[in-house]
Amino acid sequence: MENYEVSKRLGKGAFGEVYLVRRRSDDLQFALKRIDFASLPPAEKKATMLEVALLGRLQHPYIIGYYDPFHDGDELCMVLGLAG
């Protein structure tokens, strides 16, 4: 998390929370999705990692950009572009 500064929580879902963050290197803003990875059952962990791999390959003007997956302790963090 040293690369990002958290501004505020944007929302909460069944698997985690989403925050507005600023990347320290260039001051750009992103959405940061934090998932409690440690508490997921093994099948959900596998499905989540497949989703992360798929999102990393998708590039289309109508799909939210996906930038930087990383682990922060027991949480999986996904840095995404902001919508609208």
Image (cartoon, rainbow, N blue to C red):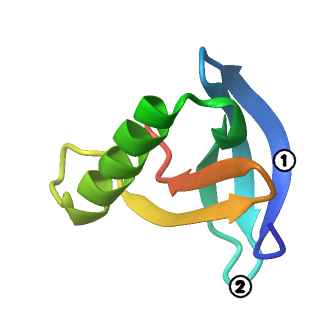
Q: Residue at x 60, y 30 (%)?
A: 40
Type of residue at label 1? Ser
Q: Examine the rendered structure and indicate whether residue 19 appears above or below residue 81.
A: above
Q: Circle 2 sits in a helix, a strand or a loop, which is it?
A: loop
Q: Examine the rendered structure and indicate whether residue 43 appears above or below residue 46.
A: above
Q: Residues within 10 Å of mark 2 (few under 14, many from 20)?
A: few
Specify the quadrant of the image occupied by residue 54. Answer: bottom left
Q: Residue at x 83, y 38 (%)?
A: 8
Q: Which mark is residue 25?
A: 2
Does residue 63 appear in the picture of this structure? Answer: yes
| Left or right: residue 76 compared with residue 42 | right
Q: Examine the rendered structure and indicate whether residue 66 appears above or below residue 36.
A: below
Instruction: Check whether the beta carbons of the residues at disc 1 and disc 2 lie within 8 A of each other.
Output: no
Q: Quadrant of the C terminus?
A: top left
Q: Nearer the viewer, residue 71 or 8?
A: 71
| Left or right: residue 44 compared with residue 55 | right
Q: Residue at x 45, y 31 (%)?
A: 44
Query: Whole-percent x and y of residue 39?
Result: 69, 31
Query: Whole-percent x and y of residue 37?
Result: 64, 41
| Furthest residue in direction bottom, as rendered | 25
Type of residue at label 2? Ser
Q: Examine the rendered structure and indicate whether residue 17 appears above or below residue 73.
A: above
Query: Whole-percent x and y of residue 49?
Result: 40, 50
* N-terminal-most mark, 1 or 2: 1
Query: Whole-percent x and y of residue 30?
Result: 59, 54
> Distance from label 1 to label 2 (Cα)?
15 Å
Q: Quadrant of the N terminus?
A: bottom right
Q: Name the residue carrying label 1.
A: 7
| Furthest residue in direction top, as rendered | 14
Q: Residue at x 72, y 48 (%)?
A: 75
